[in-house]
Image (tube, helix red, strand yellow):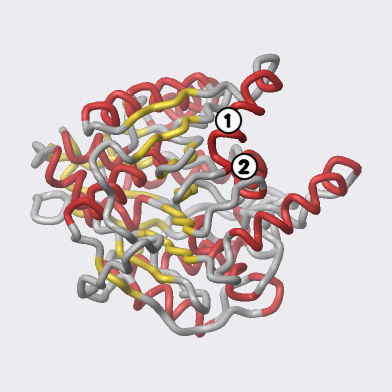
Amino acid sequence: MPGTYALVESPVQLLNVLEWAHARTTGTAGTTGTAGGAAPGGTPGPAATTAYAAAGDRAAAPGPAAPGGADAPLAPGELTVVVLPPRNATTRGQLLRMSGLARDEGHQLLWREVRGPAGPGAWPALARRLRTADRLVIGDPFSRWAQLLLAGSRTRRVVVVDDGTATMEFTAQLSRGEPLVRWHRAAAPRGARAALFAPVARRALRGLSPVGGRQVEVFTAMPVERPPGVTVRRNDLAWTRGRFGPPQTTGGSDLVGTSLVETGVIHEDRYLAAVASLAAEYGVTRYLAHRKEGPEKLKRVAALAGLEIVRPDLPLELVARTGPIGRRVLSFPSTVVHTLPLVLRGTDSGVSVCEITDDWLTDRASPRAGGFLAAVIAGARGAHGLPVLPVPLPPPAV
């Protein structure tokens, strides 16, 4: 049925849908864009890295809303957020909390269990509902669930909001017309299931491209390449800053956890040694765990580094804004090195980014991984002036 529908699978995606809705109703979203290319194989080259570093530093002037376009104003009650929850219990808990905030903002919510035994029953009705949507807002363009729904929709207006640093890779791949593959994967999925899904993926990629009169917008806090014909609008986390805080800051340092171990990008032992080294060097007292980190790993973090483990029940951007938060926040290259400087603007808290060297990478890591992480660091340094901290570690055991 007509209307604007947002598809989200994580708390951060839902947060950025709320930011987009706020910008669309207040007219505060600015336009931005970058130039620059990427090296073959998907690893950002020097031009792309320079573009990443420069784009977020621009004070984007508000761009005009095209009547009836992807960036058209949002009417009260027009947005329906469709939550497609994963099975991870921590993620589901954060999604429930974020859903409550979305309802508080006057948006409608649909919680649909598309995974597991209930999926076959929930899917057809949801697909029918979205087929004639006026506008679709996509939280994760790499998601097969989102691609299935997009491939079956006739909408001519598509918005992609941030799913973290993955947006940088999405816009780069869209610019080059490549299949959408997450940056930490070595190659596109193969096998019978992948072959069966390939036509859907191709149709979804066309649905994310500004062809045949389709209007495509990317709403992002990341410094990105601007694909030809795509409108890029700046997400400066205005809703978060206006709704929460300012936070109380503590005298110590906090370290933000990462899921790079869980995704197979870096060695766990190297990561744990780095956490212990940073804790000793910079007086870190709290470890703000990523929602995908498991209890056994967090026990090792606490034992090796002597840190208090904090399990946030909301996205870190909201946790930081409500406080308490360390006067210094350390993070490995991730989304928060671009979002926390925005939400902590005007407070006593600052953010530093910690280097990851190639000897941390596993054999399973994508060949693009090292270059991508370096681009995230360069972008944070260029856009927000973040200090980059080396992590002194002994050489890995042979």
Which of the numbered marks, if any, corresponds to residue 74? none
Residue where numbered disc 1 is placed: 126
Q: Secondary structure at mark 1?
A: helix
* Amino acid on which disc 2 is placed: Leu
As drawn, which residue projects farthest toward the right? 192
Residue 255 spot, x, y in % from top left: 33, 41
Figure check: 109 above or below 216? above
The residue shown at (38%, 27%) is 109
Residue 398 visible in the snapshot: yes
Q: List the residue tagged with mark 2.
A: 149
- Which residue is painted at 31% across and 51% down in the image? 20
What residue sits 65% from the left and 24% below the top? 115
Label 1 to label 2: alpha-carbon separation: 8 Å
Comparing 117 with 358, the one in front is 117
Q: CB of mark 1 within 8 Å of CB of mark 2? A: yes
223 above or below 4? below
Residue 257, position as x, y percentages in the image: 42, 39
User: From the viewer's perspective, is residue 11 above or below residue 386?
Assistant: above
Q: Residues within 10 Å of mark 2 (few under 14, many from 20)?
A: many
SS for tag 2? helix
Residue 43, horizontal then vertical, whole percent: 62, 71
